Image (cartoon, helix red, strand yellow):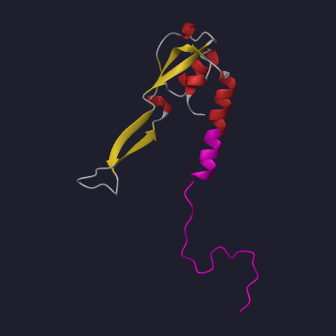
Amino acid sequence: MRNPIYCVADEYSYHYFLEHDGNLFGDMSEFDGQHGLSSYNKTDQMKVEDEDSTFFNPKFSQLMTQKPVSEWIISVGRHEGFISSRKWVETQKTLDEIAEKYNRPHRKTNALLSGREGKEMHL
């Protein structure tokens, strides 16, 4: 859902990436409303040794972290775009709202009666 490859390359998507400091490759006239987008440099990838790894049986995991849009390289692809740019941008806004809502740090407290507000206490 985050991958812009399915998004139609048009003026709306061009301006979305321009506003988000994306590195646009090509002129706006190439964003023709028919082709899809191609994106590069979206993630950092790193191999790390797995905890079950041994000298004789090495095991690795690959960690990928999403880079901010400002580090992406965006160009017009040769393929047809499938999702309208307006729907794709709307989806990005929804995903950002969800991430903001659920990725907030939880408030921790050492208070003895935390979580008991509004409940009657019998002593």
Q: Quadrant of residue 8?
A: top right
**Figure check: 31 above or below 57:** above
Magenta region includes residue 107 = yes
Report x, y in % for residue 39: 49, 24
Q: Residue furthest bottom?
A: 123
Q: Quadrant of the N terminus?
A: top right
Residue 2, percent from left and from top: 57, 33
Residue that protrudes farthest toward the front in the picture: 56
The number of numbered badges drawn on the structure is 0
Is 34 situated above or below 59?
above
Please name the residue shown 64% across and 19% down the image.
12
Picture coordinates of residue 123 (x, y %)?
Answer: 71, 92
Residue 31 within the magenta-colored segment of the rendering: no
Viewer-side residue, 89 vs 7: 7
Toward the top, the furthest residue is 29
Q: Main secondary structure of the magenta part?
A: loop
Vertical order, 61 against 31 (above or below): below
Does 120 sit left or right of 16 as displayed?
right
Q: Residue at x 52, y 15 (%)?
A: 77
* Rendered residue at 59%/16% (across/down): 9
Residue in the foreground of this view, choosing between 29 and 80: 80
Q: Residue at x 57, y 54 (%)?
A: 104
Could you say which quadrant of the image residue 121 lies in?
bottom right
* Residue 80 position by quadrant: top right
Query: Which region is colored magenta?
Result: 95-123
Q: Position of residue 109 (x, y in %)?
A: 55, 71
